[in-house]
Structures are given as structure tokens and as C-alpha cells.
Amino acid sequence: MNNRRTPKISLVNAEKTYRSSSGETQTALAKASLDINEGEFVCLVGPSGCGKSTVINLMAGFEKPNGGTVTIDGKPVTEPDPDHIMLFQDYGLFPWKSALDNVLFGLKCRGIRDQEAKQKALAALDSVGLATYAQRHPHELSGGMKQRVSLARALAVEPSVLFMDEPFAALDAFTKLHLQDELLELRKKRRLTVVFVTHDLEEAIYLGDRVVLMAPNPGRFVNIMDIDLASPRNRTDDRFDHYRKQLFTAFDLVHRESSQMNRALVTESIQQGGSGI
């Protein structure tokens, strides 16, 4: 009898290519394979241009692979699914709607009736500490509050998967740390599967069960690190520092190799008669 669990999300040799303006094929992601289990929190890190957003967009159904497969619950991902919600850095709120109405929007799109939708929306706002701000509009809210409204809107529809593409990047340090803790608490209560893109290596260690390091040219997975730390995590203890040093060392190697490759490409372009710019 096979007791092996089917991964919640699975990439098998997933590839994504584009045509450049000059007609050349460019590989954003090269034969990437990764399994993510139900309830797992996985962080994607790496230098700019390494394919982090490409990976999360493939998982969320905003893009389709040119090769290989991307599946969730064993089914091919062919388009966005209301059970798999994406949060972006720019909040995506309607400026003319109140916080409550922004959260209600997603519920009404799911066909949930008015009274039930309002109860769910208020409960979602309460879960992120914004019940008393339900009638405020986005221009009346801080950046952290706007991201909480965005998170409440996502949680209100009770998704099984939450995709997050640098959601806290524009926030101040204090707000960012606070929202990291809130996200972990909400994830624990709801048993969410989370895929989280970030440039902040320490954030990845603090949040992730695993951290996946990517490299560019072409985009690929080069290191998958298990973070064996109990929650809540302490950024100042020795074990956290061990993972921090390990990840920073791996990232530095990727960054240096990427820089050397870019210099080589510029030199080759100049030698072939281009400007290199």
C-alpha cells in the first residue's frame, strides 16, 4: 500500500520561456521541480531576475508553462482559481470603497449572499485587527493597514492556498515585523499553504518552513533549505543566526556568479559589435 501523500502544489520540470524584442528565446525558468505539502510555508528568495515571480505566477495560474507541469491537488493549473489567492505588494484595493466593501467584493464575486457576506467580511477584518476601521477608505489607512485589508479580503473567501509576492516590501520595519507575526498566527489557525516571495533573507528564515533559493540566467532552483526552528522564532538566538549565515553565504555565492555571468554577456555583446547596454 502506498502511503505517500500527494503534494498540495507540484512543479515537475516546469519551464517558462519568452520571445525577446529581437526575436530570441529567453528562458525565465528552466526545468524546475518542487513539491509543497499542504499547510507548508515556503519562501522563494534570490537576486532580481531569477524567476521568483515567474514561479508564483505559474502556480497561481496567471501564466502557463511552456514545458513540464504545474499542479495543485493533483490537477493541472490552467487559470486562476478562487481557492488559490494572490496578494501583491501594491494592495490592489479599490480607492472608492471602504475597507469593508473591499473585503465584501471578493465574497460577492463568490456568490455569497449579503448578510452572510457581511458577517464573513467583518470577521476577516477583525482577524487582522481592523474591525473598528471597517468604514475607512484606503486613503485614510496607513500602508500596513492597507495590506491588512488586502489580507482580510483574501482570508474572507477561505482559500486553501495563499500566494504572496513581496507583500511587505514597501512597509516600514516595525510594521513589517508586526505583520509577519500576524500572518504566522493566521496561517496556523487556518492551516493555509503559503508560497511567499521576498528579497529579505531574514524574513524568509523567520516565516518559512523551507526557503528555496533561486539563481538567474536561466531562472532555476539551486538550494532548498529546511528551517528547523520552533515557533515563535527568535531572531537573536544562535540557531536562527546559524540559518541566517547559511542562507546569506549561499545567496552571496549566487549573487557573485550572476554578476560574473552578466559581465561576460556584456563583454560578448561588445565584441560582437553591440554597445553592451
Image: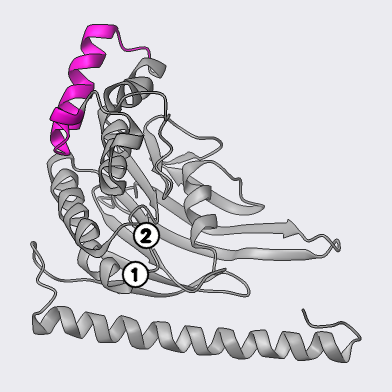
The image quadrant that residue 116 belongs to is top left
Q: Looking at the image, tell me whether mark 1 or mark 2 is earlier in sequence order.
A: 2
Residue under label 2, please give it.
169
Quick check: 3 above or below 232? above
Query: Where residue 203 sits in the image (x, y, percent)?
Result: 27, 67
The image quadrant that residue 97 belongs to is top left
Tell me whether the residue at label 1 lies in contact with that at label 2, contact meaning CB atoms closer than 8 angstroms: yes
All told, the count of numbered labels is 2
Q: Residue at x 49, y 84 (%)?
A: 255
Residues in magenta? 111-133
Residue under label 1, please give it.
200
The residue carrying pointer 2 sits among few (fewer than 14), some (14 to 19) or many (20 or more) residues within 10 Å by Cα, namely some
Query: Where residue 130 sits in the image (x, y, percent)?
Result: 17, 34
Q: Residue at x 25, y 50 (%)?
A: 3
Q: Residue at x 15, y 26 (%)?
A: 123
Q: Residue at x 41, y 50 (%)?
A: 89
As shown in the figure, which amino acid type bears the numbered disc 1?
A: Asp
**Along the viewing direction, whichever of 42 and 5 lies nearer the viewer:** 42
